[in-house]
Image (spheres, rainbow, N blue to C red):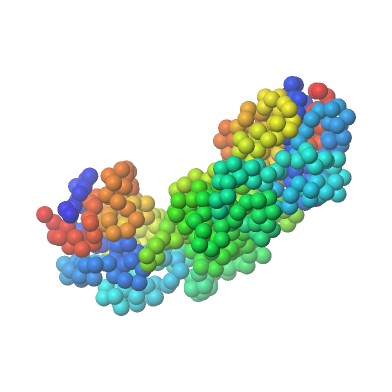
Amino acid sequence: MRATAETFDLAGVEGLILDLDGTLHNGGVAAPGAIELLAWLRQRKIPFVFCTQDAEYGEAHVHSRLRAAGLDARQEEIVSGGAAAVAFLKARYDDAPIEAIATPRQGQYFADRGIRLAAKGDKPAALLLLSYNGFSGGDLDRACQTVWAGADFLTLALDRSFRMPQGLIPGLGAFAKAVEHVTRKRARVLGKPSHEIAAAALAKLGTSAGATLVVGDNLDADIRMGRNIGARTILTLSGTTSLADLTRVRPAERPDAAIDDVSVLLQALKTQL
Amino acid sequence: MNARTGEAKPRRIKGVVFDLDGTLVRGPDALPGAVEAVAAIRAMGISLAFCTQDSVNPPEHVASKLAKLGFGATPDDVICAGWFAARHLAETYPGAKIYAICSPDLRRYFFDQGVELVSPADAASAKVAFVARDPHLTAETLAAACTAIWAGATFYAFGHDRLLPLAGRNAPGGGAFVKAIEFATRRRAKVLGKPSKSLAMAALTRLGVAPAEAIVVGDSLDSDIRLGRGAGAGGVLVLTGGSTERDAEAATGLRKPNAVLASVAALPDWLAGA
């Protein structure tokens, strides 16, 4: 399953959708080959976008964090789960209240962008899961009661886990699965791997899905998004997914190739494009 | 309502395992007719046990609650899934470190069994991760269970219960946390509570009757009916809890009850047999 620079085919790739944490950097430190990859793509005028689940800090902060890691990013190249969620909520619910399971900073992110968060006594039109930390306190109960009362069930992500400096931690998907189990309702995902965020990324790239390569460390977010739209997919093993994990998933969930880190991708691009 | 059955009633029932919530009690109260039904069945010379998925309260608490309501239960008659699991793990993994998410009472019981429970910070050193219902669960303690499993611990849980029936409403069941950990770690928990065969055998041993001479009576197809039928006993569904007659009709395999009764009040007549 693990690929080397020679073993996967990049012919016809015209644009790239790149994940951030676990792919281009780990906790703010550039991954091996990441700085060189971006420099090479710019030099060859191959378009790319950064696709992140962020719904907490905003594009300006994500951008400055990338610059601090030495990555040559432009703010307009960032596509975020937060922006996709805001666009979806505005189009679908207008000014109806949204019940968010969120950290204070996440709540502020949505309030700052004109989303009305449910106050006491409101009847929420939708439940939106944003924070795994909802497991503390009564948030699981609140989430289930909101869905039982008829609200739409939305989640930013279905990620199983994240790699942090101290090790893996469970992802928001774990919380979403808990609510799904209790309510027997399926969550609609607004960030990766939704069609909405994929469409936003492709629109920025100006490439067709078939000529696009999605690179990321998360099977449930990055690889699934790529497969959903018919793009090619490469998994980096530098983040949340291990080679052993790959043997546990169905073939339909697997990437076209798995690489240790993006330095392998850069080598392959140099020899094939 | 009469017994509705897809299969023949097991003959000559000598032992009955009762589920509690949704079957004999709801929240703090006995269900109508339940106390009288249990007394009538006891008077028929049938041996009784009470088996609850409760993993928060010890058997002594549950027995004293049942006794106060008039069911005449002693702690020896009561099997709490969490307590059974703790003893099972202590016997299966002697001397092993265990990371457990559970209630303070169950934690003390683990200690009494000589089990070393590790803190969330030491979760990676655990050989076993066990998840039961914990009123004080946090995102951190749940993450530590994942850490233990990622580091190689064997994953056990009390069950996958969807709902926790409270007086007047449902709350999320403890199975929600088990599902969350299963999703994060891509591992399936081994269930020690209902409907595990080891729990069923413990209950049947308590009754002192052969599986074919016993029934489990409960309101859940997934927990109670499977508990009984999976161990070779019968399963009788009552409609006073989480299941409807339509659920019972749609059920197949080990979820299919041998009989469906409107409530436990109809059980003595059913046992007396037409």
Image x and y of residue B3, in percent: 18, 52
Relative vertical location of residue B79 with respect to residue A154 in this rendering, above or below: below
Residue at 75 percent of width and 54 percent of height: A165
* Position of the C terminus of chain A by quadrant: top right
Tell which of A9 and B167 is nearer to you.
B167
**Res. A237 in view:** no
The quadrant of the rendering that contains the N terminus of chain A is: top right
**Residue closer to the observer: A142 or B124:** A142
Q: Is residue A260 above or below residue B39?
A: above
The residue shown at (56%, 46%) is: A93
Name the image quarter holding residue B60.
Answer: bottom left
Measuring from the top left, give residue B131's x and y in whole percent.
Answer: 52, 60
| Left or right: B76, with A3 as reference point | left
Q: Residue at x 74, y 49 (%)?
A: A58
| Residue sticking out furthest to the top | A12
Toward the left, the furthest residue is: B274
* x and y, in percent, of residue A152 in the image: 50, 47
Quarter holding residue B274 = bottom left
Q: Is residue B121 above or below residue B188?
A: below
